Image (spheres, grey):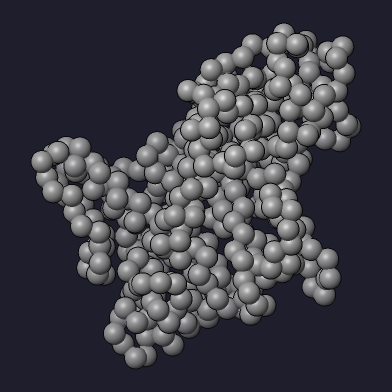
Amino acid sequence: MSFARADHHLKGEQYVRGLLTAPGRKSIRNIARTLDDTGAAQRLHHFICNAPWGWRAVREALAEYLVQRARPRSWVVRPMLIPKSGTNSVGVHRRFVPATGQLVNGQLAYGLWYAGRSLVAPVDWCLHLPPPDSGTPAACDDGVAQILRLAQRSAYPVTEGLPTATEGDLPPVVWDSQMHHAADVMSALAPLGLPVLARTPGSIVLHLVDRYGRPSRSGALPAQRILAAPERFGLPVHDVAPGVRAVLVRVAPARAGDGSGEQLLYAQRYEDPEAYDGRAAGDRADFWLTTPTRKSPAELHLLTRTAARVARDSARTGGRTGLRDFEGRSYDGWHRHMTLASVAYAVQSLTALDAVRAVVRDPQAPCPPPPSSPSSYAYPRQGPGRGERERPLTLVG
């Protein structure tokens, strides 16, 4: 990743190292303390909130690096609510959270996550800004589709002007949010040409259709009723994982305007509590709408597991790399902080992955201790014989 100016490169590397090593909250003040420099806090504050470097270009470079390192299995979009006690941070607003049924004061961000075989990492962010002078809770997902342009560009790598991926093998977008009607999401994303799997409530009403596109005689039904008694409708049930059973069926929206074109309902029920994957005890089923796909129910289940992994890691690793720790009124400052926090997230995940691979190659080798100083997070250097797809992640262009 490149910065145009040498001082920006230096401060960017200092900030990323601070995100990885500063104890407690990853505030600018705490990050500056890791430098043992009395003037560092003021310089880093200017670098994040006012310096003229483009966070968009850095994010694109991060996504490009991860894609070239290994092609993603999917792109995951999910919301991240950041509770705030006051109103001194950009985008803070009271908003309704459907999952809890509560009004929460805080920021709402949407993240676009690279999801590979052994690594997930955020590569782009959208911060929802409340309407000015509004006394009502803000809509939860305005303008989110714009971040998917990055996924589209990354999904169509270009060599000498010619795409090297065809539409049939593009990594799908997994939209893991019920804050927007899934059919509307699919309609909005259709022009991008990416396959989509979008979470939807079990209460969504759908028509079952046959292979000729004709609605069944049973009429429109809630998705949860279809999953509750699939044999009643002659639907095969698939054991997609231990303790998880699923159905995959062609459907059509019950109301005009709820999306268009052919859709599939993928619904899965967790029969075994150990298969819930961290879900609440009463959340025993998932419902997803997807574009036509050749993927089997078992493959669709793996995509939903990837989304669950992003949800877990965004709380765990994201908490250690400062995804929720920016405080300030600067919109650009929030985006710059989130950009470098995403870089720190990728560095930490890649470092952990390399450590695991080293142990697998040599089980007798001692497990390296967790990094405790900035030097412990030195970016890996390119050794003899390492190919371009394994080049190190660095802030130097």
The x, y position of residue 174, in whole percent, is 59, 38
> Taking 132 as reference, is 391 above or below it?
above
The x, y position of residue 100, in whole percent, is 69, 52
**Can residue 193 be seen at all in this image of the molecule?**
no
Q: Residue furthest left?
A: 364
Q: In which quarter of the image is residue 255?
A: top right
- Identify the residue at image location x=31%, y=78%: 34
Q: Report whether 386 appears left or right of 156.
A: left
> Taking 367 as reference, is 372 above or below it?
below
Q: Quadrant of residue 196?
A: top right
> Taking 4 as reference, is 111 above or below it?
above
- Identify the residue at image location x=53%, y=55%: 124
Image quadrant in which the N terminus is located: bottom left
Seen from the viewer's position, the closer of residues 235 and 215 is 235
Q: Report whether 135 appears left or right of 63.
A: right
Q: Quadrant of residue 397?
A: bottom left
Seen from the viewer's position, the closer of residues 222 and 185 is 222
Q: Report whether 309 appears left or right of 184.
A: left
**Can residue 375 be seen at all in this image of the molecule?**
yes
Seen from the viewer's position, the closer of residues 156 and 202 is 202
- Identify the residue at image location x=83%, y=71%: 134
The x, y position of residue 56, in whole percent, is 52, 62
